[in-house]
Image (spheres, rainbow, N blue to C red):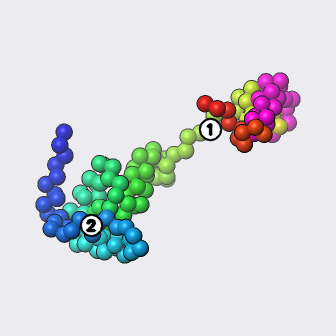
Amino acid sequence: MIPNLDWQDRAACVGLDPRVFYANGKYARAQVHAAQRVCATCPVATQCAAWAIQSGEKWGVWGGMSQKELRQKRVRDRAPRNSASGKPQRKAPEPAKCGTRSGYQKHLREKTEICQPCRQANTDADNRLRRTGTTKAAA
């Protein structure tokens, strides 16, 4: 399906050098601000930004939004939201299971007797940490 791009004909940037919107080098920040000033006068800035976000555009200023702002908006739009606070929902961590290092640590926290599978998992993780620098098992 070809998206409707009729709004592009009404954009304030029509006829401008596209390099204005792709900042680089020593004066990149000033270039971004100059591009955003053009976008501030644009009647279709909202459609432009929405198109850039939807299409995954990674470079340039679109609809007055810098590359960083577009990336942040994309991430915010993708994250599931808590309806009450509007903040992204965090996935609840899985409870610690016996036979894992986290199970071993749970025994220590709760001051319960450490079972043999948890003791072995902790020993294995310690040995892995000494060998490889991480407690994570190779995938």
Local SS, label 2: helix
| Amino acid tagged 2 | Arg
Q: Is residue 43 left or right of residue 32?
A: left
Quarter of the image with the N terminus in it:
top left
Residue corresponding to mark 2: 19
Q: Quadrant of residue 100?
A: top right
Q: Residue at x 39, y 51 (%)?
A: 74
Name the residue at the top extreme: 116
For residue 67, above or below residue 38: above
Decide: marks 2, 1 in contact (CB < 8 A)? no
From the image, give the main secondary structure of the stretch colored magenta: helix
Residue corresponding to mark 1: 93
Label 2 or label 1, whichever lies nearer to me, is: 2
The answer to which of marks 2 and 1 sits earlier in the sequence is 2
For residue 54, above or below residue 46: above
**Does the magenta run of residues contain 80?**
no
Between residues 21 and 75, which one lies in front from this camera angle? 21
Q: Residue at x 28, y 63 (%)?
A: 63
Q: Is residue 137 left or right of residue 120?
A: left
Evaluate whether residue 100 shows in this view.
yes
> Magenta span covers which residues?
109-129
Q: Is residue 108 left or right of residue 12?
A: right
Local SS, label 1: loop
Q: Residue at x 79, y 34 (%)?
A: 127
Evaluate whether residue 12 shows in this view.
no
Quarter of the image with the C terminus in it:
top right
> x, y percentage for residue 92?
59, 39
| Amino acid tagged 1 | Pro
